[in-house]
Image (spheres, rainbow, N blue to C red):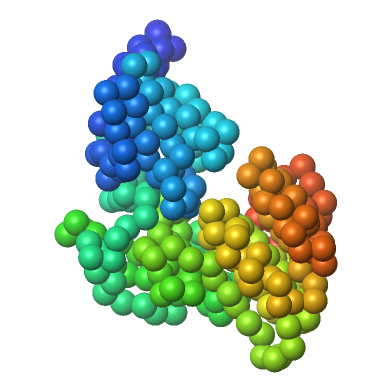
């Protein structure tokens, strides 16, 4: 009997309009026609809309990630949860998500108010860092706890500042960013530009430094924050003697690595280090070591 009920719930959820569901989460089309709507991806950082919703069949496809499906698939992807939990979220039966369902997209500075930028101390954020095997003291060196308001509601997140004074925001339930979008270029105390280590995202960088703590002493670090910023990263890289790439083991990551290797001959691909894993953080989480 419960299986039949869940099947019914799945059928109902699949027929819910994806465009309207995204709107409830604060996602609105960048461009739209009678047949389709294009959004910034709700689960990847990007500056050009590559997330398509086919209105005729009510299905989505993320061209940047190479993934697609129905509303249930989308919620599973956004919240990294099971079908059962996704149905609870869709049907508003899971109160633990209610105050976290803010827009998972790039937020313009004129609609968000940062109330406080402080050292990371919130227990929920520390617990989140622990779950991703990132040392708190490392996160505190590079990131901050951001308290902010959006649409009259208060939120908090781990924030990484970029070169244009924008922020990448992360907590257990979402990833977002505050415009303007840009790379994050972290320089060590040395004036010599010998080595530059490049990751795609904030947690890949934090994972790398947590696992290999001396990397910050012998290398500058660059976080793409979006593969759309690859060309800018390549320009910055031309000033360095050695480029070490720690990009994702997915389609876009491998494509970015290939482009780097073609343009910057002194680049080194280190993705074999986390072979069989999507990225540096997923590889680190899989390890048995305990990081404190």
Q: Quadrant of the C terminus?
A: bottom right
**Which quarter of the image is occupied by the N terminus?**
top left
Furthest-left residue in view?
Answer: 152
- In this rendering, the answer to whether 186 lies above or below 263 is below
Number of marks: 0
From the viewer's side, name the closer residue of 289 and 231.
231
- Compared to residue 98, the image places residue 215 above or below, namely below
Q: Tell me which residue sits at (82%, 67%) in the image.
A: 266
Asked whether 38 or 264 is in front, the reply is 264
Q: Tell me where residue 211 appears, x and y as whole percent.
A: 73, 67
Q: Residue at x 76, y 63 (%)?
A: 264
Query: Which of the 4 image quarters holds residue 13?
Result: top left
Q: Depth check: 141 or 69 in front?
A: 69
Question: Would you say 74 lies left or right of 8 here?
Answer: right
Q: Is residue 121 visible?
A: no
- Residue 283 in the image: state x and y as whole percent: 72, 52
Above or below residue 220? Residue 71 is above
The vertical placement of 239 against 61, above or below, is: below
Q: Position of residue 138 (x, y in %)?
A: 60, 75
Please tell me in which quadrant of the rendered image residue 244 appears.
Answer: bottom right
Which residue corresponds to the image point at 56% horizontal and 38% vertical from the top-left?
A: 65
């Amino acid at each position: 009997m419960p299986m039949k009920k869940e099947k019914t719930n799945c059928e109902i959820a699949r027929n819910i309009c994806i465009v309207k569901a995204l709107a409830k989460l604060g996602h609105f089309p960048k461009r739209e026609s009678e047949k389709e709507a294009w959004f910034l991806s709700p689960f990847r950082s990007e500056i050009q809309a590559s997330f398509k919703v086919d209105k005729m069949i009510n299905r989505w496809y993320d061209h940047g990630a190479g993934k697609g499906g129905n509303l249930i698939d989308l919620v599973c992807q956004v919240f990294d949860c099971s079908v059962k939990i996704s149905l609870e979220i869709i049907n508003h039966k899971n109160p633990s998500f209610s105050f976290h369902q803010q827009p998972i997209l790039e937020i313009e500075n004129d609609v968000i108010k940062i109330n406080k930028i402080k050292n990371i101390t919130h227990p929920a954020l520390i617990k989140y860092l622990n779950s991703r095997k990132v040392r708190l003291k490392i996160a505190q060196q590079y990131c901050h706890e951001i308290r902010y308001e959006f649409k009259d509601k208060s939120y908090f997140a781990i924030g990484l500042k970029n070169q244009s004074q924008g922020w990448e925001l992360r907590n257990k339930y979402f990833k977002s960013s505050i415009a303007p979008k840009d790379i994050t270029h972290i320089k060590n105390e040395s004036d010599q530009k010998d080595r530059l280590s490049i990751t795609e995202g904030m947690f890949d960088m934090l994972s790398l430094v947590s696992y290999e703590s001396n990397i910050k002493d012998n290398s500058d670090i660059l976080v793409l924050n979006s593969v759309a910023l690859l060309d800018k990263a390549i320009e910055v890289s031309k000033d360095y003697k050695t480029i070490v790439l720690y990009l994702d083991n997915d389609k876009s990551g491998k494509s970015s690595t290939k482009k780097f290797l073609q343009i910057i001959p002194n680049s080194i691909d280190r993705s074999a280090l986390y072979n069989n894993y999507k990225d540096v953080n997923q590889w680190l989480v899989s390890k048995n070591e305990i990081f404190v």
